[in-house]
Amino acid sequence: MKLKEKVAVVTGGGSGLGAEIALQLVAQGAKVALVGATERKLDAVRETIRTRGGEAAVFVADVSDENRMVQLFSEVEAVFGGIDILYNNAGVSPEGTIETTTFEAFQKVVEIDLYGIFLGSKYVIPYMKKRGGGVIINTVGTFGLRPIPNKIGYSAAKAGAMSLTRSVAAEMAKDNIRCNAVCPGFVDTPLNKGFVGEAREKFLDAHQPMALRIDSADIANMAVFLATEDARAITGQGIVIDGGTEACLYF
Ligand SMILES: NC(=O)c1ccc[n+]([C@@H]2O[C@H](COP(=O)([O-])OP(=O)(O)OC[C@H]3O[C@@H](n4cnc5c(N)ncnc54)[C@H](O)[C@@H]3O)[C@@H](O)[C@H]2O)c1
């Protein structure tokens, strides 16, 4: 129980990586605020947490809506008494090249995947300062380190999120607030529901040196580690969990 009495906010907590991370934070003793766009999905995760004896509450919020993000943290504090950990995880992953992506579509992914992290980080910091410190973790992804063709908006937004991670880490170290990113490779979640079957297996065989298939728990293990005091000296980093893909130029 490395996070006993800690309060964690997890955006995109209703599915995929966010749901798994929320469950693992609870397993370490944290109370979790589940944030997302769809109440039904968040409710289901809260019920799972409750059946395991944990504490969770649901907050519907669009992470790209500034007014809502300001309100959100005050609502979480009212329910749980404070905030120690923010996991900025909500995201979308549209396809498109520089030629096929409209400006509107580009703006949309940047609003959610980059502005969402800016807003979450900016407005949670006063609450963390009240607690004498805190931890922010962002889901970036390997495409934020090196882009892949046909994901122009996503790759740009995630690259921005990586840079933001480093800036927040540098600026907030004085207040005992650490900020890191997890950079997953391919994980089978609802985000990737269109990429299945032989095409996906061939892609992974060609680009991921390790033969294993990465699952949500592999990412959650790292996110939870970064949230604990075991990682007290780590800030401003993007930890890659991708079976070796990002390590090599051609595979
Ligand atoms: N699955 C992968 O292979 C992979 C790889 C690298 C990075 N990521 C990142 O991991 C994060 C989680 O994705 P996932 O794979 O678990 O997929 P997912 O689709 O299950 O999770 C994304 C969640 O974000 C929520 N969301 C989307 N827009 C939102 C908004 N405007 N406001 C609030 N919530 C919103 C969705 O409802 C969903 O619950 C994303 O940021 C994604 O880019 C995923």
Image (tube, helix red, strand yellow):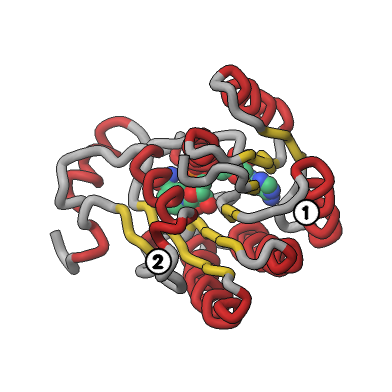
- Location of residue 146 by image quarter: bottom left
Identify residue type, mark 1.
Phe
Q: Quadrant of residue 149?
A: bottom left
Q: Secondary structure at mark 2?
A: strand
Q: Return the mark for residue 73.
A: 1
Q: CA distance from mark 1 to mark 2?
A: 25 Å
Q: Position of residue 208 (x, y in %)?
A: 20, 51
What's the residue at 61%, 34% (across, down)? 14
Q: Amino acid at mark 2?
A: Gly
Q: Secondary structure at mark 1?
A: helix
Residue for badge 2: 238
- Which percent across, then down, holds residue 72? 80, 51
- x and y percent of residue 25 in the render? 51, 41
Q: Residue at x 45, y 58 (%)?
A: 229
Q: In this picture, is 12 found above or below 145?
A: above
Left or right side of 57 for 153: left
The reply to whether dot 1 and dot 2 touch (C-beta < 8 Å) is no
Query: Which quadrant holds the C terminus?
Result: bottom left
Some atom of ligand 1 lies within 8 Å of the CB belonging to the residue at label 2? no
Question: Could you tell me residue 181's position as x and y percent?
Answer: 46, 62
